[in-house]
Amino acid sequence: MLLVDAVFLTATLLLYMFLPELRAGLHAKYLMGHTSSLLVAYLFLGVVPIMPILGSTLCVTIAFIIQFAFLAAFFWLNVMCIDIAWAFSGLRPPQGSAIERDHKKLLFYSVYAWGTTGLISIITAMTEFIPGLLATNSPLKPNIGRPACWFQKPAATLAYFYGPMAFLLLGNLVLFLYTAGRIISVRRDTAILSSAGNTAGSAIHNDKQRLVLYVKLFCLMGLTWVTEIISWAVGGADYYWYITDVVNMLRAVFIFAIFCCKKSVLHLLRTRLISILPCTRKLTRGKSTTSFSGPTSSLRLTTSFKKSVRRPSMET
């Protein structure tokens, strides 16, 4: 199933890179950061079960990469939530032209997402490798690679992985509730602006459409990872969690469906292919000529994370 996730995440990234219209806005950059992080995490997660030597340097390195990639994906999701909340907040945007503002926002959000994730990884590495910083038997000692290519103790897993995830999910929920409240408060103004044909009303409409996509993504990532955290904490027989495991392992499929399986995207893809493939252009011109040759002619367009990284013993 990890292979399925990797395929659909790759397809999402390739589609956004192939279609300039999709990656034109800042929100596309955020989504690509989120998706690329998930892709790296799944690729290295798939390597863990075939690692020949537990505790080796490679094993420890892969564990740090998985931690960084998954946390980065959550921080980019948080960036989306912050950005959409800012759009409805009514706060004055940074000074400068639209391009300058976008560059500043992207730089700030990139430093926040990658930098904060890197800081957590650095703290994890310090507690793992600096002698005397934490006792070997400390619950917060990562002890990565013993007995698996992951954290040894539940407290360390919570502190350096699931804890930050849960905090970000809670923060995202607060941001969405705030945004929903703002939408309700400006609904009357939006109706007035839209009826007057004001461009600001159109911008608000676009932001609301973007919010719908982000809410879908948040529900997908939030609900699946909440069940993941619960199953990790509660434990029990694997068959108790089969349904949630299947949903978790198919989250990349849902991401592809939410952002790529739309009529507008399919239209952009078709237009792009026609513009770059000579054979397609000739075929299209031929069809267009035929469509006007007579009155009856017409043109028809036709894994779970916990299964790969076994939860260590609850003994501390």
Image (tube, rainbow, N blue to C red):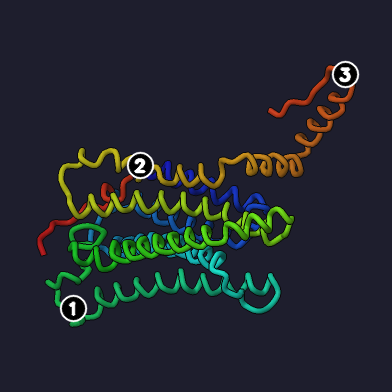
Which amino acid type is shown beneath numbered disc 1? Leu
At x 16%, y 42%, the residue is 237
Residue position marked by numbered label 3 in the rendering: 295
Tell me if residue 159 comes above or below residue 184 in the rendering: below
At x 31%, y 62%, the residue is 166
At x 30%, y 43%, the residue is 245
Residue position marked by numbered label 1 in the rendering: 134
At x 55%, y 51%, the residue is 13
Do the residues under discs 1 and 3 have CB atoms within 8 angstroms?
no
Which amino acid type is shown beneath numbered disc 2? Val
> Helix or strand or loop: what does disc 1 sit on?
loop
Pick whichever, 131 or 303, lies toward us.
Answer: 303
Pick whichever, 277 or 187, lies toward us.
Answer: 187
Instruction: Give the mark nearer the N terminus: 1 vs 2.
Output: 1
Q: Which residue lies furthest to the left in this view?
A: 315
In the picture, measured across the screen, residue 71 lies left or right of residue 97, that is: left
Pick whichever, 44 or 39, lies toward us.
Answer: 39
> Helix or strand or loop: what does disc 2 sit on?
helix
Do the residues under discs 1 and 2 have CB atoms within 8 angstroms?
no
Spatial distance from mark 1 to mark 2, Cα to Cα?
37 Å
Residue position marked by numbered label 2 in the rendering: 247
Q: Mark 2 Cα within 10 Å, few/some/many (few <14, many 20+)?
A: some
Of tags 1 and 3, the one toward the viewer is: 3
In the picture, measured across the screen, residue 44 lies left or right of residue 200, that is: left
> Helix or strand or loop: what does disc 3 sit on?
loop
Spatial distance from mark 3 to mark 2, Cα to Cα?
51 Å
Image x and y of residue 41, in percent: 39, 56
